[in-house]
Amino acid sequence: MLPRISKPEEPNSSRSYGAVYTPAFFRSEEDFLDALKMGRADAQAELFRRHHVRVTEVLERVMGPDDDLPDLVQEVFVRAIAGASRFRGTSNMLQAWLVKIAIHTARGLIRRRRVWRRFFSNSESPPDVAWSGAASHEQLEALQRAYNIFAKLPTDERIALTLELIDEMPLLQIAEVCGVSRSTIKRTLNKARRRFQNLVELDPALKDLYTGGGL
Amino acid sequence: MNSGATNKLASDVRETLRLARADRPIEPEIRLLIDRVRSVRSRKRQQMWAGFGAGLAAAAAIILLLVLPLTRKVQFTVGNGQDSGVENRWIHAEAELPVPLRFSDGTAMDLSPGTRARVAALSRHGASLSLETGRISANVVHRNFADWTIGAGPYLVRVVGTEFDVAWDPDLENLEVEVRRGTVKVSGPVLADDQSVSTEQRLTVSLRERRATIHTLDSEASLTDVPPAEMPSAEGADLRGPENARSASPGDLSAQWITLYRQGDYDKALELVDRLGFDSVARASGPDDLMKLYDLVRIAKQPTRAIRVLLIARRRFPTSEAASIAAYKLGTTYAEKGQHAEAARWFVQYLREPGSRKLAPEALGRLMESQERLGWHERAEATAHKYLSVYPNGPHRDYAQRLTSH
């Protein structure tokens, strides 16, 4: 049986802001990519549907608890869609491409915030974690303290270390998404690990939690 | 903390992030995304149209800029206030400072003090000026079809693009054309048609003596005649050089006034300079000799000439220390003449110039005095505060303290 072929979506100006984008079906992955490159809304919706979980996860792990996360995810997809016509790969390479855009976007945000803080604020700490969910108070405390320390690392080291420690991304892939060579990422990670260890030593609460058998 | 503990921390962080993650419904997110993509596209389209419009406007402006000069006459302004110039209206430079004429094609001319001239006619390619008396320093922008002429008595100086001075003394019937860059053509009595005067050359014509000579401008030895073959072959032209006309060569005389200056015989030195031609000596002198010439006229109490020498020093050697010192001395000269606004302007100029530290305490002090004399009490007080903070034991300390104690 042939797969269903979805009609290309006709944007309707009268209801464009309330349109519901039902899951789209494409004859093949090539069709999906072509539709994406042509700027069809159904393909864009499909791209989000397929990859938003991974993009959100990576950004969450790099940035930590952050009120701007949903906006950041949107920003990544907007950039990806804007540059889709230049994408030269197969659909199974889309996720790696999106992760790369996510890292680039996150790096930009971290740097902008650093500049902003340097000139307009004395606060160096990220916002308090106030999420609802199943996490315990101790877990949230450890999470916040860990990201307080990540925030003190240089931007590239912070990104590389969070990808390695929290996202458990392989070394080569970290180098790929960060856009640097393998030896560069190794050096960056070595420096980041040393700096992270030293900063943890200076945080008695975190040290107690992990050397005193907490959590 | 060892690596095991670090891994445990990482694992806990990962787990906490997972637990704390708020599940957000996907459809509103997709709608938001599509809306954002559309708004980005529409913004880009607007930017593209705006860019297209700006490009069209720029192209139209360029066309206008290219076409207008072909159809419009050259315009000009007179003076530092940049009043619009009017054809055929006489311009008389009375003040100590030159009167600038600025033309719309970038050509600049300065009328030296005492000069009377007029822009007789304007055209698309230039202008015709008429110099009744005095000196015009011109920097004519070279363009295709440029057509600039300066009439001086019976002489006509024709220019394409160059930097030069024209001086005409109707009483003595002397013409002087000095070219710093480029070439001009001069025609008139005593000269052959279209006598060329090139870079670093000076043509002097005495109509009364029916004599014309060309000198090279550079160095003392330059005041020699060009070989007769290069001289104009006009009827009655006297090819004798100045050395034949005088008992000593101009180079010797030039050295003599400096010797007299060094011996302290200032009156005789100035007398000799006047014999050689004050302006010629000033223009042929280096920065150090210009300062000596300034001393001569200052001692002779001739402030107008002193100002002229200092302005020549600043114009000819703009980056030298002499130019900077000339700014300070212009301040003191104007102050002595009681023109305190001009004095203050030059003291400020001196203090602004790079490397002007040697006379800075005096300049700041004299600035303070000039401001106070002008009744600018607040400015004088501010300058006094600055003076005391920078030169607490400077020569104007008492004066500054008096101003700040009010």
Image (cartoon, rainbow, N blue to C red):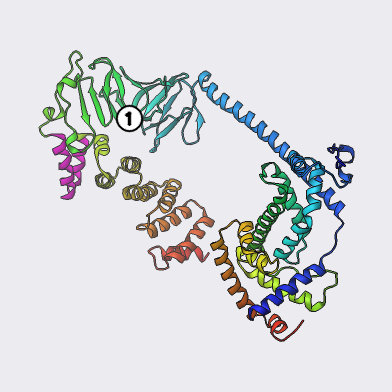
Q: Is residue B73 above or below residue B393?
A: above
- Of the residues shown, which amino acid type is indicated by label 1? Asp
Q: Residue furthest left?
A: B247
Q: Is residue B348 above or below residue A126?
A: above
Image quarter of residue B142: top left
Residue at point 62%, 64% (across, down): A171
Q: Is residue B36 left or right of residue B195?
A: right
Residue A128 visible in the current orientation: no
Question: Could you say where residue B165 lies in the image, as x and y percent from the top left?
Answer: 32, 29
Chain for numbered disc 1: B
Residue at point 84%, 64% (across, down): B22
Chief SS of the magenta region = helix
Question: Could you say where residue B64 lies in the image, as x and y percent from the top left?
Answer: 57, 24
Residue at point 19%, 15% (across, down): B233
Question: Could you say where residue A181 lies in the image, as x and y percent from the top left?
Answer: 56, 58
Instruction: Look at the image and say whether residue B256 sits in the magenta stretch.
Output: yes
Image quarter of residue B361: bottom left
Question: Could you say where residue B375 lies in the image, as x and y percent from the top left?
Answer: 51, 52
Closer-to-camera residue (A82/B186): A82
Q: Is residue B383 left or right of residue B131?
A: right
Residue at point 71%, 76% (across, down): B9
Quadrant where the image shows the N terminus of chain B: bottom right
Q: Which residues are magenta?
A: B249-274
Q: Read off the residue under disc 1.
A: B165
Q: How many marks?
A: 1
Q: Residue furthest bottom?
A: A212
Q: Is residue A58 above or below residue B240?
A: below
Mark 1 is surrounded, within 10 Å at the Cα level, by few (under 14), some (14 to 19) or many (20 or more) other residues, namely some
Q: Is residue B272 above or below residue B15?
A: above
